[in-house]
């Protein structure tokens, strides 16, 4: 009764949690699309999209995607055979164990009327699927420990997922091992299922099961060949139809042999019942919390793969775009593949903001939508991580579940802007411009008595120090498209390129970093290419901005 109540409670929590998640897909809003649409409108648009896909040629593409991307897991295979093997073991080990063993009354017994959990091939398959899942968990844990990026991005939920799967497998093996060696369990089965009537047959059967089935009895049974032969006959008449030799359960049998010295204690009913309760409760807990953990990707990841492989995001209406983005947030497995391949991930060594990594940006976006009030104080940190992105699309290309991460970044940028969080580069520019003399246009090269001076060579690289070659011929300023776009450029930019080179010779820091020209530079290299002295003007601007960024974060110039 306890297990039935626990199972029904877990199923109810699972159902309500899943319903809440699904409704959230049509309620959550990221970016600009779908902001003014109601939940009902988005649901209707989603239904229309489903029917238009199923009753079109796209249906055949869905079948292809299901076979290649979901069943064979082709996308994961691109990351290497070990990654594919790990995910294959966890996914199929868990699913097959669930279908064949956990739901045996609903599925296995219906398909196989002669089914018993203690006969082959079910005895062997149960251990095989459990071993597959445990092996996959071990590989996943190894990768998270020894891969630097995965170690940095690992969260409590990732550890929870691996621990729950490991506990399910290990407790299952240990529970079965205690059943194998338990003489109490043996006596219960003999009393309930056999037709043994005399002590001679009972003794013979005990002798046979002690040797062939690894049962440990308080009093060692006879080892005589005649008794063993008699026990074999009794076994074939009473037990063979529903019990295969436990050696088929290769993992559980190995555990049973290992615990043989303590078998009489561990085989008692109280210990077995405790293990049974623990095993089932872990399973029920995993089921109940599935919609609220990363386990939910078991349902959402295949859905996102199917949706994104048949959907042209540029032609999708705002309602379905917003819905797809919301589903994608629940589909992330937090595998950190995108972070491992991120083209700017190395910047984390200089700027320790975890939101630089794509997997953490996506998590931050989900948190931002789920709990807006608590995330307001974290907006600058999230914004900085979002801004350090080259939009190379590499993260989207390698995502094993097909999430359009680049689209999520554009939506995230729009959300953060709407919340009043400026792009860090613009904020940094404004901070330095605000420190600059408001009446700077009155002098050719404004000097600040209190201005901080750069140290030797102003701290630039060797190529950055090429400003010493400048003799202020103004060629760089004449070639600059930014300067040419203003009628009175000095009023708008403060210092022109050749004036900045001249200021560097004086070692003035505030005036240089406060010049709008440094921050408005397009990086077109026109100035640098036309300089007769070989001054690396554009490269100097880049270095100056990097120094300013470092200074703003508390570093020293």
Image (cartoon, helix red, strand yellow):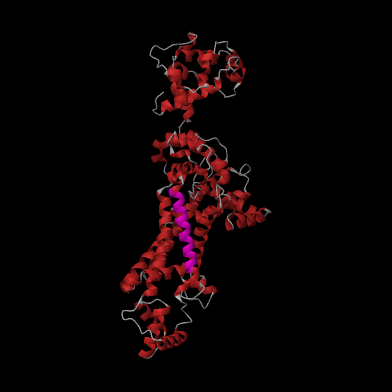
| In magenta stretch: residue 127 | yes
Residue 490 placed where, x, y %?
53, 13
The stretch of residues the image draws in magenta is 126-145
- Front one among 55 and 234: 234
Residue 474 placed where, x, y %?
57, 12
Left or right of 58 in this view: 135: left
Compared to residue 524, the image places residue 39 above or below, namely below
Q: Residue furthest top?
A: 443
Residue 459 placed where, x, y %?
45, 22
Q: Quadrant of residue 193 in the image? A: bottom left
- Front one among 112 and 38: 112
Q: Quadrant of the C terminus?
A: top left
- Front one among 459 and 489: 459
- Front one among 284 and 463: 463
Q: Does residue 366 show up?
A: no
Left or right of 45 in this view: 222: left
Total residue callouts: 0
- In percent of the image, x 38 and y 77: which residue is there? 215
Question: Magenta region, mostly helix, strand or loop?
Answer: helix
Q: Quadrant of the N terminus?
A: bottom left
| In magenta stretch: residue 434 | no
Q: Does residue 356 show up?
A: yes
Compared to residue 198, the image places residue 33 above or below, namely above
């Amino acid at each position: 009764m306890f297990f039935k109540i626990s199972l029904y409670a877990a199923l109810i929590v699972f159902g309500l949690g899943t319903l809440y998640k699904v409704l959230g897909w049509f309620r959550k809003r990221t970016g600009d699309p779908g902001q003014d649409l109601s939940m009902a409108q988005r649901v209707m648009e989603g239904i229309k999209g489903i029917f238009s896909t199923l009753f079109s040629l796209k249906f055949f593409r869905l079948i292809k995607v299901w076979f290649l991307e979901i069943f064979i897991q082709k996308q994961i295979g691109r990351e290497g055979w070990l990654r594919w093997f790990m995910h294959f073991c966890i996914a199929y080990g868990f699913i097959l164990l669930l279908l064949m063993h956990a739901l045996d009354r609903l599925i296995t017994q219906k398909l196989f009327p002669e089914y018993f959990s203690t006969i082959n091939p079910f005895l062997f398959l149960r251990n095989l699927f459990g071993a597959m899942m445990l092996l996959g968990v071990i590989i996943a844990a190894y990768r998270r420990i020894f891969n630097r990026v995965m170690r940095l991005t690992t969260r409590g939920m990732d550890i929870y997922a691996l621990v729950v799967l490991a506990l399910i497998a290990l407790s299952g093996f240990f529970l079965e091992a205690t059943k194998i060696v338990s003489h109490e369990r043996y006596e219960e089965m003999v009393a309930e299922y056999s037709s043994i009537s005399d002590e001679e047959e009972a003794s013979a059967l005990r002798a046979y099961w002690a040797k062939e089935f690894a049962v440990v009895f308080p009093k060692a049974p006879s080892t005589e060949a005649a008794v063993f032969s008699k026990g074999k006959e009794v076994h074939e008449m009473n037990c063979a139809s529903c019990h295969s030799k436990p050696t088929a359960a290769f993992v559980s049998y190995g555990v049973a042999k290992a615990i043989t010295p303590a078998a009489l204690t561990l085989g008692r009913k109280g210990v077995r019942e405790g293990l049974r309760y623990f095993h089932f409760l872990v399973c029920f807990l995993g089921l109940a919390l599935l919609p609220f953990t990363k386990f939910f990707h078991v349902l959402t990841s295949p859905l996102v793969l199917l949706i994104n492989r048949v959907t042209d995001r540029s032609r999708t209406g705002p309602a379905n775009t917003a819905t797809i983005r919301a589903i994608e947030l629940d589909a992330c497995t937090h595998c950190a593949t995108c972070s491992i391949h991120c083209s700017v991930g190395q910047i984390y060594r200089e700027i320790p903001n975890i939101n630089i990594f794509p997997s953490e940006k996506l998590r931050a976006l989900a948190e931002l939508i789920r709990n807006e009030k608590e995330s307001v104080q974290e907006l600058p940190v999230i914004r900085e991580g979002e801004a350090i992105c080259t939009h190379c699309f590499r993260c989207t290309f390698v995502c094993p579940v097909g999430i359009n991460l680049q689209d999520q970044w554009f939506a995230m940028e729009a959300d953060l802007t709407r919340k009043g969080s400026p792009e860090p580069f613009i904020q940094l520019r404004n901070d330095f411009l605000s420190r600059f003399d408001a009446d700077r246009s009155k002098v050719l090269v404004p000097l600040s008595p209190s201005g901080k001076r750069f140290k030797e060579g102003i701290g630039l690289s060797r190529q950055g120090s090429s400003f010493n070659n400048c003799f202020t011929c103004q060629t760089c300023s004449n070639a600059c498209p930014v300067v040419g776009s203003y009628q009175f450029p000095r009023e708008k930019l403060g210092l022109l390129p050749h004036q900045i080179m001249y200021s560097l010779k004086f070692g003035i820091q505030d005036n240089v970093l406060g010049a709008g020209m440094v921050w408005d530079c397009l990086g077109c290299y026109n100035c640098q290419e036309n300089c007769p002295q070989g001054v690396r003007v554009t490269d100097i601007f880049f270095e100056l901005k990097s120094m300013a960024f470092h200074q703003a974060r508390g570093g020293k110039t």
